[in-house]
Image: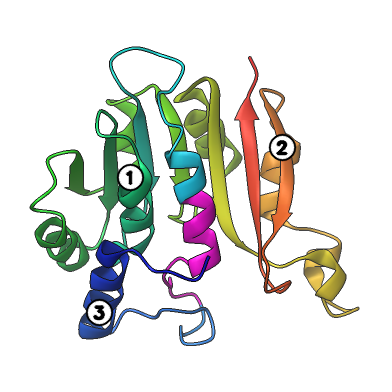
Amino acid sequence: MEEIPPLVASAQALARQLGFPLTREEAEPGRASASLPDTGRFLAMLAAGCGADQTGGGRIGELGTGAGIGASWIASAMPADCVLITAERDERLAVAARQLFAGDPRIEVIAGDALEAMSSRAPFDLVFADSGIRDGTDFAKLVGLLRLGGRIVMDDVTPQRILPPDSPLRSQDTKRELFGGEPRLVSTEVVLPDLRNSLLVGTRMR
């Protein structure tokens, strides 16, 4: 369970080289950080089934490549006939990730607006929304890029039971509101083994 795929280890080394935070604790306020190992394992589990119920392979999208750690977990588990499109606004990070994945023709790294890049490549079996989408209109567009039965995952959620009593997230949590308010999704929260982080996961049902 604790084994790290070689590609993920390479991405973690790249993150250190680039000064990209590996944890939320390392990141400055408002700055992105890498996908946690337990998030990566969850993504790998979903990616392993990509396109299993269709011919011609499946398609996975990631919004926010970062240093390529989340994409590495996905690519390490997805079937040979599945493709991964990952987009990153930061040109420096996109170039570094493109070099990291240069040996795998299944992976396309795009430098630019993630939602715009995904829109021309739908439908997706799985979308990992790791780019900070908090707007209801953008989230609705993103859900619209999923095929029926496709899944969307968002990380960096704090389980409610460990929130401080005065946390504003107890009364208003944009991420949970996006998932709970989207009628095309059936969704749930998955608490990770560290009990300090959780994921929101939704499946498009119509």
CB contact under 8 Å: marks 3 and 1: no
**Which residue is depicted at the point 27% across and 55% down?**
88
Alpha carbons under labels 3 and 1: distance apart: 24 Å
**175 over 183 or under it: above or below:** below
Q: In the image, what residue type sits under mark 2?
A: Ser
Residue highlighted by disc 2: 187
**40 over 3 or under it: above or below:** above
Q: SS class of the residue under badge 1?
A: helix
Magenta stretch: give its range: 30-43
Who comes first in sequence, dot 3 or dot 1? 3
Q: In the image, what residue type sits under mark 3?
A: Ala
Residue highlighted by disc 3: 13
Residue 177 coordinates in the image, percent (x, y): 73, 46
Residue highlighted by disc 1: 114
Residue 3 coordinates in the image, percent (x, y): 43, 69
Looking at this rendering, what residue extends furthest in the right direction?
Answer: 165
- Asked if residue 31 can be seen in this view, the reply is yes
**Which residue is depicted at the point 73% across and 50% down?**
189
32 and 136: which one is in front?
Answer: 32
